[in-house]
Image: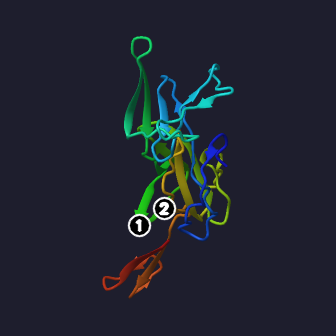
Amino acid sequence: MLAGFVTLSGGAWANPAAEFPELPSPSYRVHADAKGRVFAPLAHPVYLLLSTSPKGDAAAVFQSKPTKLPETPVLLKAGANVLKNHAVGVQEFVVHADGTPPRTKPVFRNTTVYRRANRWFIGQGAVFALEGTDTASGLGQTWAALAGQPFQLADTLQLDLRQDRRFRMQYYSVDQVGNPESPRIVDFEVDVTPPQTVLRFEGPHHESSVASKGVLVLEAED
């Protein structure tokens, strides 16, 4: 599902709600942003490779000494890690270790929103979106699934918010190095039907005239 990611060995996450599909296993990668900064996942080992090509063709993996293991991961700490080369002056290569997952929240625009307990009620003209933020490597992808349906990219999700209907959705985001957010569930209901109000009289009255002892009663239902 997360195309282009290197799959990490291990099982899928525990599913907090049986009505939703099973979540994929976390996947990790190294990411370079538009400023040239390099980010690596803190929770997954990374390796140093040497190649004569910037694409990494026929690369050799560095081995540590004295263990001489065939593949030796580089141990990173959270934040900036500086790797130095003293052969020509001092070259510094900075790797930012990112272990913080993104945060995602549901947003309702262009409508009146009412919240009761853990359920949202939205009115006419609503526009729904999932907004994710990430403070390190940046936001990667946001995924969402309606109850009983498979996960899909949140920006491809199409919801009919023009009529009364209840929705139950699970969602989460992944950052640029593959750190997954813990999935969350949101319940919301579209309410575009106005309440109905009935006027009635109690006590002495005639048509729309009420005696001094009469009572005018307004009853509303929604």
- Mark 2 surroundings: few (<14), some (14-19) or many (≥20) residues within 10 A: some
* Residue 116 tag number: 1
Q: Position of residue 29 (x, y in %)?
A: 57, 39
Q: CA distance from mark 1 to mark 2?
A: 8 Å
Relative height, residue 155 to residue 203 (above, below):
above
Relative height, residue 197 to residue 21 (above, below):
below
Report the residue marked by disc 2. Answer: 121
Relative placement, left or right, of 152 versus 17 is right
Report the residue at 57% width, 30% height from top. Answer: 49
Of the residues shown, which amino acid type is indicated by label 2?
Answer: Phe
Relative placement, left or right, of 184 versus 135 is right
Q: Position of residue 106 (x, y in %)?
A: 49, 52
Q: Position of residue 221 (x, y in %)?
A: 48, 74
Of the residues shown, which amino acid type is indicated by label 1?
Answer: Arg
Tag 1, which secondary structure?
A: strand
| Residue sitting farthest toward the left | 212
Q: Position of residue 155 (x, y in %)?
A: 61, 44
Report the residue at 62% width, 56% height from top. Answer: 24
Q: How is the image coloured?
A: rainbow
- Mark 1 surroundings: few (<14), some (14-19) or many (≥20) residues within 10 A: few
Label 1 or label 2, whichever comes before in sequence order: 1
Q: Quadrant of residue 147?
A: bottom right
| Residue sitting farthest toward the bottom | 203
Q: Nearer the viewer, residue 85 or 189?
A: 85
Q: Quadrant of residue 84?
A: top left
* Residue 187 tag number: none
Q: Nearer the viewer, residue 100 or 78?
A: 78
Kindly check if marks 1 and 2 are in contact, taking CB atoms under 8 A apart as contact. yes
